[in-house]
Image (tube, rainbow, N blue to C red):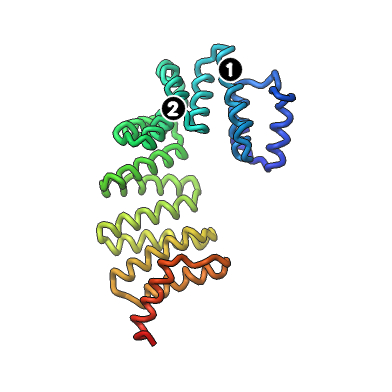
Amino acid sequence: MANESLTPEQAHHLLDLMSKGEGFDEGMDAGVALTLADIALQIEQPERAEALITHAIQLAKDTEDNDQLAWALLTKARIVNDGTALSEAEDLVAISEDDWLRSSYNNQFGIFALESGDIPAAKSAFSQSLALKEALEDKVGQANTLYNLGEIARDENDLEQAKEFHARCVDLLEELGDRKGMVNGLAILGHLDAIEANIDGAIIHYEAALEIAEAEDDFEGSVVSRWGLAEMARAMEDEDLELQHLSQVMAGFMQLGRPTPEPIKDRLNELADAIHGGN
């Protein structure tokens, strides 16, 4: 059920079918309740989602199903950012033989630690999660975790480590066919190259990101890529090329009827003055 695509109308209908007044269908188990909770979130029904999670927790306790209880607590921790639920799940995860559960716990713990500012704990949890996801051949999970580890490395100014994580992430996204995700990853690699003054490397990554972004009609990705290419043109003192990239960015905003960001307009005005002598 979780992998099937539902329209909002279908999702509403399914949730209504599984509900009876203020309660839920007696035949619903904890796993179904958790799946429905995610569906409820997708159609912006957070209160119903929380009610379903609470229902799943109670069902798991009634049946003494520790793995289901741990899943329910992790879902609660993820949806409502509840550190207490995460702590309650810890002992249950420790005795579980479900590697998917352990991987999910480590990932959620890493996110919580990252948000709390405990970077060493976040790195440790994400690394453990990544090892489990690799063993499980969970490529989506690996890509997400590599992204998180890459961003931590970037924040710590460990650029080589950041590039390694993000490059691996892009490779997995390519395998998964997530082309918009690739645009973001390639742009990050371009930015990392730019920080190290590796202009040629940055241009290669930004151009690759731009090619995919334009093929996918990814406007935001195109803007980020062209802005990066404009910055590289500026670093090479190629004002004509910089003007070309920024002008195309502005044209894109105009076509969409959206205001051009002030930094782009300011830089275009500077370039016009420099190229035309203010005339």
Taking depth in this image into account, of 178 and 239 the one nearest to the observer is 239
Label 1 near label 2: C-beta < 8 Å? no
What numbered label is drawn on residue 83?
2
Q: Examine the image and state in which quarter residue 49 appears.
A: top right
Picture layout, residue 261 above or below residue 122: below
Q: Residues within 10 Å of mark 2 (few under 14, many from 20)?
A: some
Q: Examine the image and state in which quarter residue 34 appears.
A: top right
Kind of element beneath mark 2:
helix
Counting from the top left corner in percent of width and height, residue 149 is at 35, 40
Kind of residue at disc 2: Gly
Taking depth in this image into account, of 101 and 173 the one nearest to the observer is 101
Real-space CA distance between mark 2 and mark 1, rounded to the nearest whole angstrom: 19 Å
Q: Examine the image and state in which quarter residue 207 appears.
A: bottom left
Question: Going by the picture, which residue comes out furthest to the bottom?
Answer: 279
Counting from the top left corner in percent of width and height, residue 48 is at 63, 31
Residue of label 1: 58
Question: In the picture, which quadrant includes the C terminus?
Answer: bottom left
Taking depth in this image into account, of 46 and 173 the one nearest to the observer is 46
> Residue sitting at 31 percent across and 49 percent down?
163
Q: Is residue 71 left or right of residue 188?
A: right
Taking depth in this image into account, of 278 and 33 the one nearest to the observer is 278
Counting from the top left corner in percent of width and height, residue 58 is at 58, 17
Question: In the picture, which quadrant includes the N terminus?
Answer: top right
Kind of element beneath mark 1:
helix
Q: In this view, does 146 lie to the left or right of 258?
A: left
Q: How crowded is mark 1: few (under 14 residues within 10 Å), some or many (20 or more)?
A: some
